[in-house]
Image: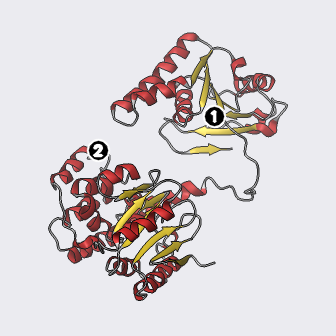
Amino acid sequence: MQSVTTQKCDDVLVVLVDNPPVNALSWHVRQGLKDGFEQGLSDDSVKAIVLRCAGSTFIAGADITEFGKPPQGPDLNIVLNMVEAAGKPVVAAIHGTALGGGLETALVCHYRIAVPSARLGVPEVKLGLLPGAGGTQRLPRVVGVEAAATMCALGEPLSATKAATIGLVDRLASEDSLAEDAIAYARELISVGPRPTRDRPVHGDIAVVEQLKTANAKKWRGFDAPYANLACVKAATWLPFEEGIKFERAEFLKLMGGSQSAAQRHMFFAERQAAKIDGLSKDIPLRDIKKVGVIGAGTMGGGISMNFLSKGIAVTIVEMVQENLDRGVGVIRKNYENSAAKGRFSQEQVEGMMALLTPSLTLNDLADCDLVIEAVYESMDVKKEVFGKLDAICKPGAILASNTSYLDIDEIAASTSRPQDVVGMHFFSPANVMKLLEVV
């Protein structure tokens, strides 16, 4: 199957990328884009070109599995420069996500149309990198220095609706008619002509660079990538475009060759590999977890509860003494409100999460839970007693989990009549912050 195909719709050529699962910019996609655009540019009957993607998303980014390997196919920058230099208007039609190299591809298109649910961003900083295909130089020319610096240094995506307000998206399409809307928009632009991003002036206040450094000094301590991103955006304000591209490339190569990005990329792959279990069939049915029980409202039990509440999953938390239960619930609320004060949640979100929490003084209230996690005293006798009671209370098919860090899970499971449903789920403290979970 070809990863890039073309379709002529009267005077508009649609270049369609189809490289599942996320339409990454693999070498064969770059080759297909080069071939597709060369076809459109050499055909005098084609007056405009639309770049669109099949599947659930626009180009979601570079193919990072190619990082560190010998290059294949055309260089991405050569392809992007060809698109930008096109003598016919080029429209990027965006749905799903346009991230990293995906957004850089959209930026070389002269115009951008997106469905409201789409998200756009340059998250490379989270891998210890920066947008290395002209993103730090083109973004300030499209959205201004303030928005570009913030997007590059923080790496957070924007909704298409927000992107439209800052000029990153030129038009919003209907959710169910992006293909048709993009072609119609391209036809409108035939009389307008191309709008190469590199030729647009940089605007905005460079003071935002120092403001971002000050506001994030603690979080960025020891990290090179945020500062390199800001240096590149700043360079766009005083260097000619081609010189800015050279500056960006030099900074990108320094980061790519450094130990920080290597470590952050290792973490990226490791976190995803952790979700895959060797030898486990992909079509094995999953158990639906809609309600969770947590035994123990101390530091660990409260943190575990927050993990599920933050994801919209109802939690019943059980303690033996009212005072301990009240204290635990109070700490959960305080933690959420502290996060809200820092802008991580709205007060409405805090109340929504707290509404999902049911405090209880009896294990019987765990009868309808799909997953129960005990976080009580590290004593085998205590664990066995708790699991014996859960065995009698919990519904068939419920997962019974222990947060133990070292006790024998098989011995705990033997205290129940359903050892196949007993697992170890060892959270690391603080459980609502640490991403590591040991499953036994």
Relative placement, left or right, of 121 versus 365 is: left
Badge 1 or badge 2: first in the primary sequence: 2
Q: Element under label 1?
A: loop
The quarter holding residue 170 reads bottom left
Q: Which residue: 80% across, 29% down?
A: 415
- The quadrant in which the N terminus is found is bottom right
Q: Residue at x 46, y 74 (%)?
A: 68
| Distance of label 1 from label 2 (alpha carbons) | 32 Å
Left or right: where 155 falls relative to 115: left
Image location (x, y in percent) of residue 118 = 46, 54
Residue 90 position (above or below residue 418):
below
In the rendered structure, find residue 337 and report the number of the disc placed on it. none
- Asked whether 136 or 322 is in front, the reply is 136
Q: Is residue 33 above or below residue 168?
A: below
Residue 278: image x %, image y %?
70, 59
| Residue at image mark 1 | 403
> Between tags 1 and 2, which lies in front?
2
| Residue at the top extreme of this rendering | 322
Q: Nearer the viewer, residue 319 or 176?
A: 176
Residue hosting label 2:
218
Q: Residue at x 78, y 24 (%)?
A: 388
Three-letter amino acid code at disc 2?
Lys
Badge 2 marks a residue whose secondary structure is loop
Please indicate whether residue 367 sits to the left or right of residue 359 in the image.
Answer: right
- Give the percent coordinates (x, y) of residue 426: 61, 39
